[in-house]
Amino acid sequence: MDYPAEATFYVRLSLMIPKPGQEGRVSEIMEDLLAFLRTQPGHVRGYKLVRTYPYAGIGRLTVWRSEQDADNAAQTDHVLAVRSELLQITEEDHVERAYTAYDPQLAETLTS
């Protein structure tokens, strides 16, 4: 099935492990970052991801109208500064992924 543009999104996933003693600060930064991203053009939705077992992990999942919207937001001074701070207080092995996402339920609604 070809999905209509309105049912196609761009998704970014970022996962990290705070350095010992930095869990609270990383959590605060993540909430601040998600609040800022909500104000950016093309932002659809954002989620804070938390893992407690077997180790403390934190991340975010953001949904965008387009890759360009996500790229524009990622290049703002605020996001660049926040990412710089996160690099200092998290372990080196971050997971950063990007996907094209299709919403079959929305596509069905749009084509009905």
Image (cartoon, grey):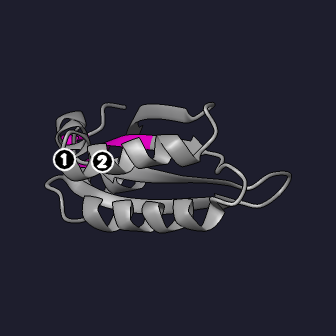
Residue at image location 54% in from the left, 59% down from the top? 26
The image quadrant that residue 83 belongs to is top left
User: Depth check: 27 or 84 in front?
Assistant: 84
Tell me residue 74's x, y (percent).
Answer: 26, 42
Residue 43: give x, y in percent of width and height: 24, 56
Side of 18 relative to 82 (left or right): right
Magenta stretch?
4-12
Q: Amino acid at mark 2?
A: Ala
Q: Position of residue 4 (x, y in %)?
A: 23, 41
Residue 58 seen in render: yes
- Secondary element under disc 2, as helix, strand or loop, is helix
User: Dot 1: what SS?
Assistant: helix
Residue 5 located within the stretch drawn in magenta: yes
Nearest the viewer among 99 and 95 is 95
Write the residue at 42% across / 48% down.
Answer: 85
Three-letter code, disc 1: Asp
In the image, residue 28 sits, relative to residue 90, either above or below, namely: below
